[in-house]
């Protein structure tokens, strides 16, 4: 089976992945053999991470679920033109990009909700690097409260990193990913550093004969390359450093802090959970798993400048700082052909378009799309065969804008 399979033919239910007690060898998916990262197996795996690796819960708390008033519309027929000039509908766009679940909110009302493959409304799906944006918001909240100084050097909070590439990097440079690091993040290259990071954070099998490592141990080994503060370079280890800063400043686990500061106040519908390393430490750069509705609720927190469920959950200044973006000139050298004129601020991708849209983004098509002008939030989980979002941006970004325009009338 190859990536030539379309969404319908790669549907996990159709292929009967992990059915039977125990599953037959030909439909079994495991962590140890790496099959959970292969296509089409990943179409099942991304909605069932808890069956594959150790995890840590983000408690939703004892309070009531915040209401998402329903005012459903048939958005599937909306027409759009992809970046390569193809005319399709929104429904077709979802199929072409292997969507697993999507929720569209307009002015806080749920106007569109669909699920495909292995995902269901109550089930959590891995957020991949959308996780980074949660870590960034937590760090931004601490900075706004004076507990974290963006201009301080990283070892101020994590002394273990003094001799690493982060020894002379500021917290702000880590937050905006403008550090100069030798680390590489090429998902299709098994020799790329991203695979060593995955082994350290528990999301790739341990190498036979090599000593086991953990996230912090891996971060201390990172060499510097180039200068800090000059240009944006997307490297997940920045977020894991930021997560360690958050832990050290608060004395809390990432899962506990997210529960207390965001998940409970916003009235999440379900617990979330993180994948963890061998010491039980959460992957702050890519390990969060949530339902689509709760992902949308967090997007609504951001759209409303931090106010949601009757309270100010995130300081408005934190959201405004993110939405304002960073310097597109520092972003441009990264060469994202589908994101011209964008920037990266505090673990969020900022479009600088006419709608002021900003995004949380993860490989294989995960996203939160916040459009302040259209008063719209789109939360989307997917299992695209290609990891890099350059594979689905040409369809999803025009689709999101088409929905925004339709909702604006």
Image (cartoon, grey):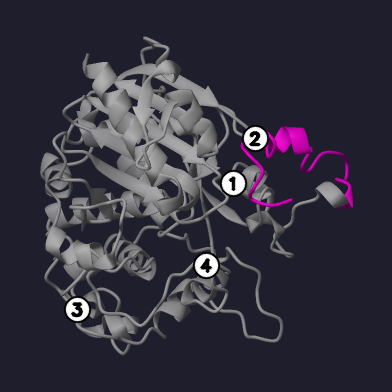
Cβ atoms at labels 2 and 3 below 8 Å apart: no
Q: Position of residue 114 (x, y in %)?
A: 51, 23
Q: Does label 3 or label 4 sit earlier along the sequence?
A: 4
Query: Which residue reaches farthest bottom?
Result: 163
Q: Secondary structure at mark 1?
A: loop
Q: Secondary structure at mark 2?
A: loop
Q: Does label 2 or label 3 sit earlier along the sequence?
A: 2
Judge the density around disc 1: few (<14), some (14-19), many (≥20) Cα neighbours within 10 Å.
many
Cβ atoms at labels 4 and 1 below 8 Å apart: no
Residue beneath the point at 23% across and 76% down: 154
Q: Secondary structure at mark 4?
A: helix
Q: Quadrant of the C terminus?
A: top left
What's the distance in space between the residues labelled 3 and 4, CA to CA?
A: 25 Å
What's the distance in space between the residues labelled 4 and 1, CA to CA?
A: 17 Å
Q: Nearer the viewer, residue 398 or 125?
A: 398
Question: Mark 1 sits on what residue?
Answer: 46
Cβ atoms at labels 1 and 2 below 8 Å apart: yes
Q: Does label 3 or label 1 sit earlier along the sequence?
A: 1
Q: Position of residue 324 (x, y in %)?
A: 11, 47
Q: In this rendering, which labeled residue sits more in front, label 4 or label 1?
A: 1
Question: Mark 2 sits on what residue?
Answer: 118
> From what the image shows, is residue 203 above or below residue 356?
below
Q: Which residues fall within the magenta stretch?
A: 1-25
In this rendering, position of residue 2 left or right of residue 67: right
Question: Mark 3 sits on what residue?
Answer: 228
Query: Which numbered dot is residue 201?
Result: 4
Q: Main secondary structure of the magenta part?
A: loop
Q: Could one spot residue 297 in this view of the protein?
A: no
What's the distance in space between the residues labelled 4 and 2, CA to CA?
A: 25 Å
Q: Position of residue 316 (x, y in %)?
A: 13, 39
In this rendering, position of residue 109 left or right of residue 190: left
């Amino acid at each position: 089976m190859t990536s030539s399979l379309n969404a319908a033919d790669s549907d996990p239910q159709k292929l009967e992945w992990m059915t039977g007690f125990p599953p037959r060898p030909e439909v079994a998916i495991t962590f140890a053999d790496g099959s959970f990262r292969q296509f089409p197996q990943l179409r099942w795996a991304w909605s069932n991470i808890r069956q594959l690796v150790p995890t840590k819960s983000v408690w939703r708390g004892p309070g009531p679920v915040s209401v998402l008033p329903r005012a459903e519309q048939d958005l599937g027929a909306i027409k759009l033109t992809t970046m390569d000039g193809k005319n399709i509908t929104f429904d077709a766009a979802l199929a072409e990009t292997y969507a697993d679940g999507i929720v569209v909110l307009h002015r806080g009302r749920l106007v569109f909700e669909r699920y495909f493959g292995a995902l269901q409304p109550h089930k959590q799906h891995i957020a991949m690097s959308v996780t980074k944006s949660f870590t960034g918001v937590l760090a931004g909240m601490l900075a706004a409260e004076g507990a974290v100084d963006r201009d301080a050097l990283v070892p101020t909070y994590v002394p273990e990193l003094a001799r690493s590439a982060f020894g002379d990097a500021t917290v702000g440079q880590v937050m905006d990913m403008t550090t100069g690091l030798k680390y590489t993040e090429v998902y299709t290259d098994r020799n790329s550093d991203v695979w060593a990071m995955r082994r350290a954070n528990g999301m790739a099998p341990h190498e036979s004969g090599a000593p086991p490592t953990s996230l912090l141990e891996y971060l201390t080994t990172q060499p510097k390359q180039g200068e800090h503060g000059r240009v944006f370079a997307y490297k997940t280890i920045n977020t894991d450093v930021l997560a360690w800063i958050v832990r050290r400043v608060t004395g809390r686990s990432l899962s506990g802090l997210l529960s207390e500061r965001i998940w409970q106040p916003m009235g999440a519908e379900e617990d979330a959970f993180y994948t963890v390393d061998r010491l039980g430490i959460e992957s702050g750069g890519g390990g969060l798993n949530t339902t689509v509705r709760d992902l949308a609720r967090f997007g609504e927190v951001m759209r409303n400048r931090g106010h949601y469920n009757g309270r100010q959950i995130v300081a408005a200044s934190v959201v405004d700082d993110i939405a304002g973006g960073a310097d597109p000139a520092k972003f441009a050298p990264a060469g994202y052909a589908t994101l011209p004129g964008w920037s990266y601020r505090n673990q969020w991708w900022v479009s600088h378009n006419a709608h002021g849209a900003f995004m949380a983004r993860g490989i294989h098509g995960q996203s939160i799309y916040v459009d302040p002008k259209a008063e719209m939030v789109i939360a989307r989980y997917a299992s695209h065969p290609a990891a890099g979002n350059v594979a689905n941006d040409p369809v999803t970004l025009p689709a999101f804008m088409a929905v925004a325009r339709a909702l604006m009338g």
